Amino acid sequence: MSAAQPLRISYIELRSANLDVECVEVLFLDCRRSIQQQANNHFREEFPQPLTVQGETFSFSVHRKRWYFPYIPDISNIQINVREILSDSRLHKFQTVRSSLDITIGLSPDRPSADVVSAQDNPTPPNTDSPRPTTEALLKQCPRFRILVVGKTGAGKSSLIDRVFGTELPFRWYRPPGLQNIDEGLISKQNERVVLHCCDGFVPNGNDSCNTVKSFIMDRKNREHVKDQLHAVWLCFPVPIIEYGERLLEDGTETFWQKIASVLENIPTVVVFTKYDRLLAYMDVVHERDPEVEAERYLQRHCIGPITTLAGGVDLSYVAVSCRFRLF
């Protein structure tokens, strides 16, 4: 059976009369794009340059609001078969109802260019004299992006990764503290462009953990091939609520940092402040006039400031995130 002809999508529209939808994304191959919200439960995105989708299927990731357990996202995946669209596209659009969502996919009347049509549909060999895209060349050299994720148990590492890369981590990711193997790279079937390594990191008397992380980073820095090296480090800290007795820099954090700071040189390092939605909820509880503004001030005073002081002259990037879409 020949490969499905690529789709050229001119617009995507989704409506729902009875679902409380927070956001929608379209996922295909290793790409994901948000569909812009037009009104309540109405999402539409137009593509002046048609969106080319290759492969047998693509899908929509639909995030619904949850009024119970609000910090746990309710996400469903709706898969669309490309052949089904091509078999019912006489009016240059495809309409279907899936999971109480009315989905309309507009198709460009233009035929795909020769470099997009599969070889079985077009036997003419491609023009090898034209330069290849930079992305293609990079992926050949380094097919996967390798990230080390460090943070104590409960810091929100798994939720962060699921949200960023649209993945569901394999069960072996969820292991008790101290039993994770930092050398074991984890790859999700939903996004095979990323390989993840994990370590609990900031634990009291965690000299073994510090030495493990340091050795791992040094080993990866010395690898010959780019694909085997470490490409980024994420240091995850849940935003503390000081009034609840929580601390950002708990016992073990300073020791951990002192041991690994030197080996982070030339490796992109991002400090990720997780559970930011919890801080906003707290600001609502204490009746702050503008919770978002106060939360930003709080973050600067109790999170970014202390980390900057701890890091000294090390150049770090910072981001505050939540698994809830609008806060990410």
Image: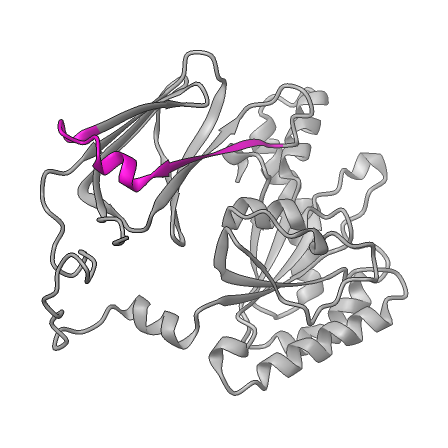
Which of the two residues, 47 or 106, is positioned nearer the viewer here? 106
Q: Is residue 208 left or right of residue 87?
A: right
As drawn, which residue projects farthest toward the top?
17
Q: In the rendered image, is residue 26 in sight? A: no
From this view, report whether residue 307 is shown above or below residue 88. Answer: below
Image location of residue 202, percent across then percent down: 79, 60
Q: Residue at x 12, y 55 (%)?
A: 113
Q: Is residue 70 left or right of residue 226?
A: right
Q: Is residue 180 left or right of residue 163?
A: right
Tell me where the magenta segment starts and ends, as one range.
73-93
Q: In the rendered image, is residue 220 in sight? A: yes
Q: Is residue 171 left or right of residue 229?
A: right
Which of the two residues, 241 or 216, is positioned nearer the viewer here? 216
Q: Residue at x 64, y 30 (%)?
A: 280
Image location of residue 193, percent across then percent down: 47, 61
Q: Quadrant of residue 271?
A: bottom right
As drawn, which residue projects farthest toward the right?
205
Which of the two residues, 77 or 25, is positioned nearer the viewer here? 77
From this view, report whether residue 190 is shown above or below residue 68. Answer: below
Q: Residue at x 66, y 31 (%)?
A: 71
